[in-house]
Amino acid sequence: MKKINSIWKKFAAILVKDFHSIISWLAIFFLLTSCALQVPPTGGPKDEDPPKILSSTPLNGSLNYTGTSIALEFDEYVKTNAASQELIVTPPFVTPAEFSMRGKKVTVSWTDTLIPNTTYLFQFGKGIVDINENNPLDSNLFVFSTGDYIDSFELEGRVIDAFTLKPIKDVWVMLYPENEDSLPYKSLPRYFAKTDEQGNYHLKYLSDRSFKVFALEPANNGYFFDQPAEAIGFIDEMIPSRNPRDTNAKALNDLKLFVQEDTLQFLKEFSQIENKGLSFLFNKPVDSLSLIEISGIDITNWTPEWNLFSDSVAYWFQSPLDYDSLKLIVHVDGFIDTLFFRKPSRQLAMGKKGSRKAEGLGLKADNPAKVNHFGVYRLKSSTPIKSSDFSTSLFIEDGDTVSLTPYARTNLMDIIIDHQWKEGSKYQVVIFDSAVCDKFGSCNDTLRFSFVASKKEDFGELTIQHDLPKESVQYVWQLLKPDGKVYLEEIVSAQGTVQYKLLPTGKYKIKVIADQNENGKWDSGVYLKHQQPENVFFYEQEIEVRSNWQSEIEWILEQE
């Protein structure tokens, strides 16, 4: 038995010794094999090098060239990327050029006859790119002349929106060697270029002469001013091209882009307001309007509700009208139109959501949570108000409750609550069920409005002394919020002072319009009358109105 135990001990010792050896060898094996594992390649740095032109036929800058194509040999394989749309050729071809490829060569060919003694410029944009990373070629300009020299004059400037003065990209700036008003309508320009992100344009390789300058934001990708909604800009006098070495050359004035106002009155939109009325939107403010119903329906008691600008009106029926159809003849400022309205659909007659439950008359506050301590609290109705009785409604000031009747008055579309508000005090208005009813029989459910009156420290004072150019007798003065929306507007003279005694704290901008025809609004230009849009000016800095702070600004604008 002792002998057997001794044998087992020797065997165990051998196993332990061999086990450690096996573990050691396995560790070495895995270390070596892990070092030999193949790691997928990362691909190296991204190729950012643009394709380069190694040779061309003809050579860039060639003279007396009269061929029908350009062949470009590149240092790598390339592809065309909407090349026909990206290519800009000046002077332009009547028939677009075509692209073909073979190996690393791109050929641009055309069928137009080249103009004698003329410099041609090809701008490829992003139309030719490399195969892998879509890098556009390093130089997208190619030039040759059909005469003995390359024209080297140029023009550059900027295109801005005439109303906002913001730069506009992707606008064609076109040059014509003649001075005829009809050219943008019927003729291709001699030279043209497109504005960049900052609204800048740069026309190169021009001949030494004067040009008619015209800007176009096309609606149909063409080069003709043939759509009434297209934005245009123009310089009225002929502009000489500039020698780039002339350091004394005066910079061109900004080209102001605008859409010509349609002077004809017409009906832009019309719609049904459920079965309670009709809505009309016109092209411009209305001077005179009359409706004639020729289906036999009495419209004498329809109630008109005009908007602030007099270009939109809602006609409210005397009561919900169950009609199969309406046929109206609309007479507006000499324009006549005939309209057909069919019976409102079941869903429309019940409201936009098609709810079967009759909803009470809705009233919404202009500013539900706050009232200016020097102003009024206004509740707007979505339908014309017929009657109101506030004898049971409540007006609560800091816990004290009185009747609402002395403070409330009713107009066609709103309720005005007027009170000597106490700064910082809390208020509640409770309008009980059926206190207000519209002309269609709908009355309010019980409504409760809670709000607080502002304090003096919510406001600041702003005074601006201004001296504006004498180009206009009067100006439209606008105080703007940072988002560009008009907060306050008034008419001012060229010189004077504008003062805001109680202006909510915050940031503002100032914009003025040279109201040359004194109609109280901005007017765009008229190209064929050589009439530019009315000038617009902005105060350069944003103005901050602080609590209980009096700010004074002097704004002097030099006459250009």
Image (cartoon, rainbow, N blue to C red):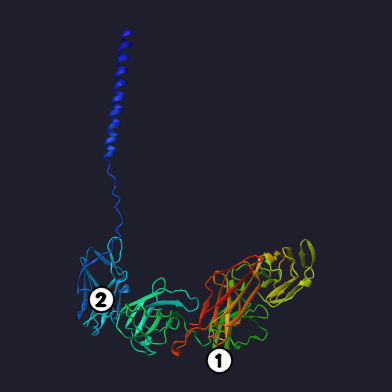
Among the two numbered marks 1 and 2 on one chain, the one whose residue lies closer to the N terminus:
2
Could you tell me which secondary element the residue under label 2 belongs to? Answer: strand
- Mark 2 lies on residue: 143
Residue 367, by quadrant, is bottom right
Residue 388's x, y, as percent?
75, 74
For the point 41% across and 84% down, the residue is 235
Rendered-image quadrant of the N terminus: top left
As shown in the figure, which amino acid type bears the numbered disc 1? Gly
As shown in the figure, which amino acid type bears the numbered disc 2? Val
Residue 188's x, y, as percent?
33, 84
Q: Is residue 1 visible?
A: no
163 left or right of 187 in image = right
> Of all residues shown, which one is farthest toward the top?
2
Whole-number angstrom distance, CA of label 1 to CA of label 2: 56 Å
Residue 142, by quadrant, is bottom left
Residue 325's x, y, as percent?
58, 82
- Mark 1 lies on residue: 334
Residue 155's x, y, as percent?
35, 79
Q: As rendered, which of 110 and 75 lies closer to the eye?
A: 75
> Of all residues shown, which one is farthest toward the bottom?
334
* Badge number at residue 264: none
